[in-house]
Image: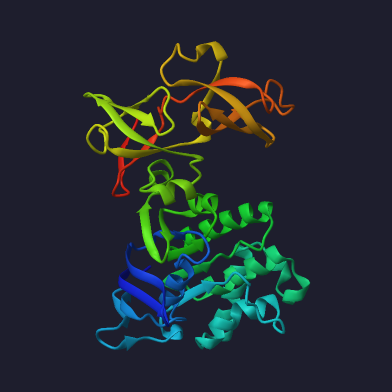
Amino acid sequence: MAEVRITGLVKRFGDFTAVRDVELAITDGEFLTLLGPSGCGKTTTLRCLAGLETPTEGEITIGGDTVYSAARGVCVPPERRRVGMVFQSYALWPHLTAGANVGYPLRAARMGAAERRARVAEMLEAVGLADRAGRYPGELSGGQQQRIALARAMAAHPRLMLFDEPLSNLDAKLRVGMRTAIRRLQREIGTTAVYVTHDQEEAMALSDRVVVMSEAAVQQEGTPREVYTRPANRFVADFMGFENLLDGTVGETDDTGFAFHPAPGGPPLRVAGPPPGPSGSAVEIAVRAAHVRLVPEGAAGEEPGVRRAVVRDAVYLGGRTELTVDAEGLPLTVSHGHVDDGAGVPGVGERVAVALTAAHAVVLGRAGTPAGVAA
């Protein structure tokens, strides 16, 4: 296992800054995921860890060994960092069998033939491909090739495992199976792991900790639950699937919370927790579609936070329908659960009422940090 520290990491390509002032501390045996959209800097950060890119500034240590330091002029080559890497494109040798691909790093490390054969057999068994040792990559499916790539990367017991969007080329069912295999092997071997993906569900399923990146910088880090339920700013809230991002102002406050006045006007919403600023100051809240309820139309005006609305769009998604409504000038997305036949779902143009009590709202402060979450 290995503790990893990244300090002041910067990577520029000419005038373009791909990674800006990234600071990370990864504990022994931790599974950390770098999550974000294309171009956010996550893969460049991973490649700097691997030694495939040379940083412009900063320092990287793995297991207490400095593998890069701009200040001290240290840059350890990839083959001496004792890391394993699984690429998006598999990167298997097409002229070598599955067994020979897995054994390649062991041969490069001058492991004895008998020990090498045993280790290859062990790793192929671990990924469920013991009966495919003699097959060539072109004779294997995409999922099988990725499992061979995983076995090869872990065969030499690296102190750090790196994954560069390894499941993006697989179908949904294979991705779920490979997630399970990756997490199981990582736990069995006990190696530290850094994983790159743009898939939020993948990040939450695999990770001990998630680091969300955007525009070359870290936006938030925390456990999957913390990032999912308490996004630090508007970008993270949007990226983590909060469908409703609402601007407004702080109204009356008391010991239990404050009134949120949405920008279009209409009835205020009661939000628990301290306000991010004084009365009249700007504030934004994030609410998931699943936490906006359809209620009887007659409830509008009778209950706090209930608004009359008109359905503008409806998208059937199997066990639920996602509705877009105009709630007195406030555009909202509502997730309406139902049986598979969609019975009872209001249609486009139908008048409804929605309850937005902000019971599960995240209040985003001006500085981009959560100002409070309703109980």
Among the 4 quarters of the image, the one containing residue 143: bottom right
Question: Is residue 362 rendered to the left or right of residue 186?
Answer: left
- In the image, residue 296 above or below residue 212: above
Q: Nearer the viewer, residue 310 or 334?
A: 310
- In the image, residue 339 above or below residue 74: above
Q: Nearer the viewer, residue 248 or 374?
A: 248
Q: Nearer the viewer, residue 228 or 274?
A: 274
Question: Is residue 146 rendered to the left or right of residue 8?
Answer: right
Question: Is residue 4 rendered to the left or right of residue 101?
Answer: left
> Is there any visible trace of residue 62 in the rendered image?
no
The quadrant the N terminus occupies is bottom left
Residue at 69% over, 26% down? 347
> Is there any visible trace of residue 176 in the rendered image?
yes
Q: Nearer the viewer, residue 40 or 297?
A: 297
Residue at 66% over, 63% down? 169
Residue at 51% over, 67% down? 163
**x and y percentages locating residue 86 in the rendered image:** 55, 71
The quadrant the C terminus occupies is top left
**x and y percentages locating residue 243 in the rendered image:** 51, 40
**x and y percentages locating residue 122 in the rendered image:** 59, 69
Among the 4 quarters of the image, the one containing residue 165: bottom right
**x and y percentages locating residue 183 in the rendered image:** 51, 57
- In the image, residue 179 above or below residue 333: below
